Image (cartoon, rainbow, N blue to C red):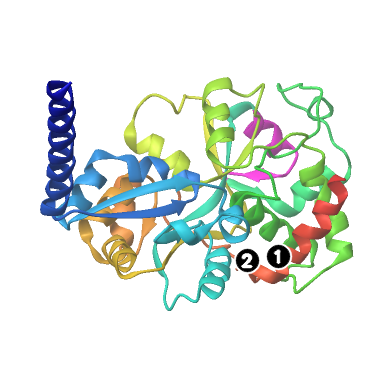
Amino acid sequence: MRRRLLGVALAILLGGAVVAALVLGNQGSGVTVVRGVIGSEKKPFFEDPKVKASFAKHGLQVEVDTAGSREIATSVDLGKYSFAFPSSAPAAEKIKKARGATRTFAPFFSPMAVATFEPIVSTLTRAGVVSGTTFDIRRYLDLVAENTRWDGLPGSYKARKRVLLTTTDIRTSNSAAMYLAMTSFVANGDDVIRGANARVAEKVAPLFLDQGYSESTSEAPFEDYLAMGMGKTPMIMIYEAQYAARLFANDGTIGPEMRLLYPSPTVLSKHTLVPFDEDANEVGRLLTEDPEFAELAARYGFRTADPGVFAGLAQGTPLAQDLADVVEPPTYDHLEQLVAMIEERYL
């Protein structure tokens, strides 16, 4: 009995010693863990071993969870994170005010774009929606208002469904909100909406409601576009960075018939980090100021404060060097009022 008790005591002591060694080892490593919640389109960047190694050089281990950017601003419990990193400046401003943060960082941005296929480009060119790599939002809205179907347009794509861009869920996702920003601008007579506008809501609601089921984050529908092709997703609203990252990786996922178009007008999705403590401040500073992170971000398709980094990678690709027809999104509250009016129609 005494031997058994002695054995148990020794096991407890040894176990305690192991735990203590692990704790002391972590303390001695000089690595600070910083947790954040980010838009899903930035997940591959943060998971890249080179990005992790670059943070480690500065004594940081950055761990992230993902959520829709609008969810981050409205329903995610931010109390367990050191920073939030949504994909739009309006959402970040909402978070900044709610959390009492004193600053934000905008290390990179991405214009909204349309990922599609050559037969769709050919069909929409004949319909007057596409010219070169420009996707005319006004003409597109005319087709939607007329309930146009693909099999009703001249061209080789004869699907028996409506001409509609695939987007994420307007109730949860920033990419859908950015799509709403540009379409509502056109529907409002080429002017940014300012508050609830029933007339504009009536025009743009079918763009979302008539799609059927929509994913909550931007990663899933883009993967469908890559994997399932034109039959599943003839054209999809994405961040340019998603397409650019695959081009730069040259991993074979961008097939010969895939095309990228730029809406006219478009909006810029400004990926904006909101820090809640000093460690997160350092994460934001490094992403914004350190050339090493700018180079890594550009390889994932993001445009940074140094345009030359992205331009060098984009040389010889279909990616636009300059963006002329760019409009500002509405304020967060005004955009939310329009989203709420569309959300009521889901019921």
- Disc marking residue 329: 2
Mark count: 2
Tag 2: amino acid: Pro
Of residues 314 and 342, the one drawn nearer to the viewer in this rendering: 342
Q: Amino acid at mark 1?
A: Leu
Q: Quadrant of residue 189?
A: bottom right
Can you see residue 293?
yes
Residue at image location 58% in from the left, 69% down from the top: 94
> Which numbered disc flags the more N-terminal residue, 1 or 2?
2
Q: Name the residue located 51 percent from the left edge and 55 percent from the top edge.
A: 111
As displayed, is residue 59 above or below residue 98?
Answer: above
The boundaries of the magenta stretch are 120-133
Q: Tell me where residue 271 appears, x and y as whole percent.
A: 46, 59
Q: Is residue 155 left or right of residue 289?
A: right
- Please state the horizontal and vertical placement of residue 77, each as a whole percent of the image: 54, 56
* Residue 322 circle label: none
Relative to 103, 324 lies left or right: right
Check if residue 174 falls in the magenta segment.
no
In-front residue for pair 197/71: 71
Residue at which label 1 appears: 335
- Residue 286 figure quarter: bottom left
